[in-house]
Image (cartoon, grey):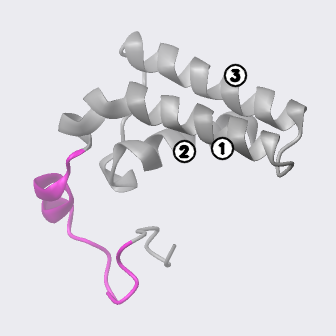
Amino acid sequence: MNKNNQSWGGRFNQPTDEFVKIFGASVFFDKILAPYDIAGSIAHATMLCEVGLLTEEEKSQIISGLNAILEEIQADKFNWSVDLEDVHMNIEARLVAMIG
């Protein structure tokens, strides 16, 4: 990601205006997709383990972390961030914070 921590903003010299971020934010509407994003990420981690790119321990950590995130979301305790652009980036950032 670029210096402004936006995956799509590499050509911009200034950070995105707060109004534009909020106006264009879809995370609050798209968060209904979170369980499906998590299911896809669990399937992806399983596949990466099956082909030898993740160890069983790494796969277990990822799946445990994703399940914990799903519980946070379902309990309405997940901290959604407009700065992280979308559902997947929010979940990924939380997973990295949890398991590294």
Image coordinates for residue 71, horizontal then vertical, percent:
50, 13
Looking at the picture, tell me which residue is in the foreground, 75 or 56. Answer: 56
Assess disc 1: are there few (<14), some (14-19) or many (≥20) residues with their C-alpha within 10 Å of its C-alpha: few
User: Which residue sits at x=74%, y=36%?
Assistant: 99
Assess disc 2: are there few (<14), some (14-19) or many (≥20) residues with their C-alpha within 10 Å of its C-alpha: some
Is 13 contained in the magenta span? yes
Q: Secondary structure at mark 1?
A: helix
Q: Secondary structure at mark 2?
A: helix
Is 91 contained in the magenta span? no
Q: Secondary structure at mark 3?
A: helix
- What is the span of residues highlighted in magenta in the rendered image? 8-26
Secondary structure predominantly adopted by residues drawn in magenta:
loop
Q: Which residue is identified by label 1?
A: 96
Looking at the picture, tell me which residue is in the foreground, 99 or 54. Answer: 54
Decide: marks 2, 1 in contact (CB < 8 A)? yes
Number of numbered discs present? 3
Q: Image height check: is 10 above or below 32? A: below
Residue 64 — which label? 3
Q: Amino acid at mark 1?
A: Val
Residue 92 — which label? 2
